[in-house]
């Protein structure tokens, strides 16, 4: 049950919540702008997709991508257009995800206002604006930010289909909108299928037969669009053995693999939701459970709307069709956040009539969920997030390189360097590409080390060899082993470091 306030107090409360939401939206946009305009270097995962976008034609982007990459065709086409119009640079490549993240904020407000209680709208919005991964992927050359946009757009479509009359103009608009959404987000099929099921059930329950038939025709157009997209793009992704190997833990072993289910749900609250610490993950899960309980009692339609997309996604994982892991699930965060927001409001309202210790406990729980993300995100205003700043390293090499110097790129930074090489006047013959196709584990196996040594020994006898490293922080043992080996075979002449990237200059005579 929701609290009933006198009309004058209710109006004051509504104005306060609206003002708070407006301030929060401004904060969220500002954070995303600061992060975007900080213009950090492309890190390895961005660089491999950027190389596909920059080096391929529109027609070639319809073919399986190089370097085991996968992205929706619509996303790739917009990225290619941005590069052609604005130039080959980080701003152009990140523009579409950035704009998608801004649009997502307003779509979330619309979606939340339809389905959440007034105070829960503000709580949900605050989380949506400040959670780590939602902010980070707003300026990354990847499709995960636009996945969120499309998921929320699908929710907006649901509100239009359920709450408005379905005339010919809207029939065509909904059919086109859903059909296009599928080309911009691989998981769009889950949100469209889930919300579509709810809208169809609503029409049948209300005995609106003509509307149900019209919805069936709209869904047929969506299904046709998906099948075409699947044949052109998604089928090749499912056949990629390297991706399947990478995703092997993202699928359960059987329908009764409950350990996998518990593990993946727990991991979800850490990444992509962003509650990393062990106790904080437990608190977030409890708040989510409270939200489910509150919505089940108060509004089962909203309960169904918020859970249907996660359920369809889990079903796809059990069918071995979609990996249930990490950033691939970022599009689910708005729905889980909304449930958590209702859980926090329910907890607070129920605690108000209880003993003081209950109020204190409720306050601590609410603070534990809201304060860390807001605080951590606020720090980005002063210090925007960086990852692998290879550009300052390349600039240092370029400024200090002498005729006859050799430049060796350690294999983990190859694709970053290949993206930036033309910008700094490097031709393929101007640098040595490190040996590739090695084991990606953190430990250096004997076979792997033998390949490394053979590769490094090609450099012996040169008085000035630049050795550039990037994308090695995740493999500390490999990083330490390789750096120590160079120190044993040569004399260090120079060293320059930037976050996530560094370079040594050695005399290897």
Image (spheres, rainbow, N blue to C red):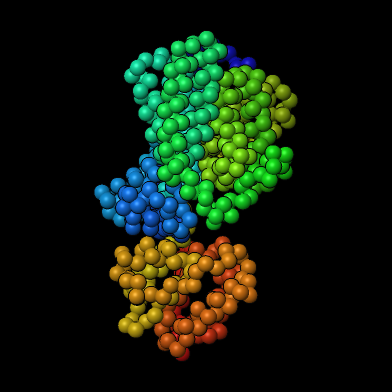
**Residue at screen point 48% across, 30% down:** 192
Q: Residue furthest top?
A: 207
**Residue at screen point 49% across, 72% down:** 435
Q: Is residue 133 left or right of residue 289?
A: left
**Residue at screen point 50% across, 80% down:** 456
Name the foreground residue: 327 vs 200: 200
| Residue 373 in sight here | no
Residue 120: x, y in percent? 55, 27
Q: From this view, report whether residue 482 is shown above or below residue 335.
A: below
Residue 406: x, y in percent? 39, 80
| Residue 406 in sight here | yes
- The quadrant of the picture occupied by the N terminus is top right
Residue 142: x, y in percent? 44, 48
**Residue at screen point 41% across, 75% down:** 432
Name the foreground residue: 160 vs 273: 160
Q: Residue furthest left?
A: 85
Q: From this view, report whether residue 47 is shown above or below residue 289.
A: below
Residue 69: x, y in percent? 46, 53
Name the foreground residue: 65 vs 278: 65
Q: Is residue 448 left or right of residue 98?
A: right
The image shows a total of numbered marks equal to: 0
């Amino acid at each position: 049950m929701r609290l009933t306030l006198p009309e004058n107090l209710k109006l004051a409360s509504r104005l306060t919540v609206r003002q708070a939401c407006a301030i929060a939206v401004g904060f969220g946009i500002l954070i995303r702008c600061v992060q975007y305009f900080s213009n950090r270097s492309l890190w390895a995962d961005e660089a491999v997709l950027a190389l596909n976008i920059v080096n391929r034609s529109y027609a070639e982007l319809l073919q399986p991508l190089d370097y085991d990459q996968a992205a929706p065709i619509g996303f790739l086409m917009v990225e290619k257009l941005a590069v052609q119009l604005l130039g080959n640079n980080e701003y152009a490549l990140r523009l579409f995800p950035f704009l998608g993240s801004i649009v997502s904020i307003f779509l979330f407000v619309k979606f939340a206002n339809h389905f959440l209680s007034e105070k829960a709208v503000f709580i949900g919005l605050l989380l949506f604006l400040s959670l780590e991964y939602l902010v980070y992927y707003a300026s990354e050359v990847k499709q995960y930010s636009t996945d969120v946009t499309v998921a929320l757009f699908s929710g907006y479509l649901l509100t239009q289909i359920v709450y408005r009359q379905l005339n010919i103009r809207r029939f065509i608009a909904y059919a086109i909108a859903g059909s296009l959404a599928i080309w911009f987000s691989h998981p769009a099929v889950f949100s469209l299928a889930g919300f579509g099921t709810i809208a169809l059930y609503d029409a049948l329950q209300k005995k609106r037969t003509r509307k149900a038939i019209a919805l069936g025709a709209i869904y047929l157009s969506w299904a046709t669009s998906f099948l075409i997209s699947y044949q052109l793009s998604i089928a090749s992704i499912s056949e990629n053995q390297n991706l399947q190997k990478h995703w092997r833990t993202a699928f359960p072993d059987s329908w009764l693999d409950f350990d996998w289910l518990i593990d993946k749900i727990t991991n979800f609250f850490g990444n992509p939701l962003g509650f990393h610490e062990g106790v904080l993950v437990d608190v977030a899960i409890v708040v989510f459970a409270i939200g489910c309980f509150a919505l089940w009692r108060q509004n089962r339609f909203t309960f169904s709307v918020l859970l249907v997309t996660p359920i369809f996604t889990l079903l796809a994982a059990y069918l071995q069709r979609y990996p249930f892991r990490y950033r691939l699930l970022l599009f689910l965060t708005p729905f889980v956040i909304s449930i958590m927001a209702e859980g926090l409001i329910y907890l607070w309202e129920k605690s108000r009539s209880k003993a003081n210790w209950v109020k204190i406990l409720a306050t601590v729980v609410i603070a534990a969920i809201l304060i860390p993300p807001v605080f951590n995100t606020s720090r980005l205003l002063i210090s925007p997030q960086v990852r692998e700043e290879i550009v300052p390293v390349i600039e240092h090499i370029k400024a200090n390189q002498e005729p006859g110097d050799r430049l060796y790129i350690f294999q983990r930074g190859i694709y970053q360097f290949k993206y930036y090489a033309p910008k700094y006047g490097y031709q393929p013959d101007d640098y040595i590409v490190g040996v590739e196709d090695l084991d990606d584990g953190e430990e250096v196996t004997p076979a792997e080390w033998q390949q490394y040594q053979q590769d490094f020994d090609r450099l012996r006898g040169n008085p000035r060899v630049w050795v550039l490293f990037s994308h090695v922080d995740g493999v500390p043992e490999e990083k330490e082993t390789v750096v120590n080996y160079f120190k044993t075979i040569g004399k260090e002449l120079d060293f320059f470091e930037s976050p996530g990237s560094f370079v040594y200059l050695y005399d290897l005579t």
